[in-house]
Image (tube, helix red, strand yellow):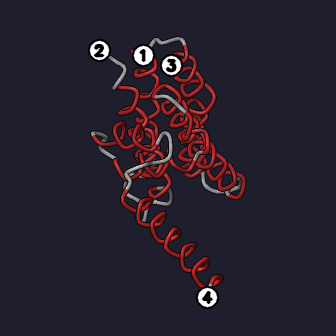
Amino acid sequence: MNNFMKLFAVFVLFVQIQIALSQSNVSPPGTNLIQQLCKSNRYQTLCVSTLNLDPRSKTSDIQGLASISIDATTKKVKESLDYLTSVYKKIGGGGRGDVERYGTCMEEYGAAANRFLPAALGDLKAKKYSLAMSDMKEVVSVPGICEDQFAGYSPLPVTQRNKAVHDIADMTADIIKTFVK
């Protein structure tokens, strides 16, 4: 009987701990900050999922979360640039119009990846938030410029990628906007 009582006591303790944990509103560090930051973002779901994907977000302050967002945008821009480059190489002997269309998109995405996003990150770190915002507006415009190159084509070959880049860049701009007074 003595062993039974010990086992029963351990079981009761386990149940009490589980109940206490399920009733507490303890969130991992950073989670509440992410929720607050993303609550007013136009892309709330994308904001929360993007920031939660990065392990640095667990210990980041709001400026760190903005940096993480710029990094995620940079990754998405570079993925699109790599895609455009691979298509461009495949159509190298294709028509002049295709070469120009993809070439323009590559130039725009290249400027976003190599100029505007690094500048936005640098401006954010230097607490030059208006400049960081201006840099992000340039990045937000890139997918539209690329999309315009394919006006009249159906289906547009880059629409999904352009939308993904636009949305994450606009989400990042919304995050940076919280610093601009």
Question: Up-down: is 111 above or below 6?
Answer: above
How many angstroms separate mark 2 from mark 1 (CA)? 9 Å
Contact between labelled residues 1 and 2, with CB atoms less than 8 Å apart: yes
Q: Does residue 173 show up?
A: yes
Quadrant including the C terminus: top left
How far apart are labels 4 and 3 at the CA level? Answer: 67 Å
Q: Name the residue under label 4.
A: 1
Which label was assigned to residue 181? 2
The kind of residue tagged 2 is Lys
Q: Distance between the residues labelled 3 and 2?
A: 14 Å
In space, the residues marked 3 and 1 are separated at their CA atoms by 6 Å
Q: Do residues under tags 3 and 1 come within 8 Å of each other at their CB atoms?
A: yes
Residue position marked by numbered label 3 in the rendering: 124
Question: Whole-percent x and y of residue 160?
Answer: 46, 58
Report the residue marked by disc 1. Answer: 129
Where is residue 24 shown, x and y percent of the image?
38, 54
Rendering coords of residue 138 (x, y %): 44, 28
Which numbered disc, 1 or 4, marks the residue that appears first in the sequence? 4
Residue 4, picture quadrant:
bottom right
Q: Reading the chain from its start, which is encountered first: label 2 or label 1?
A: 1
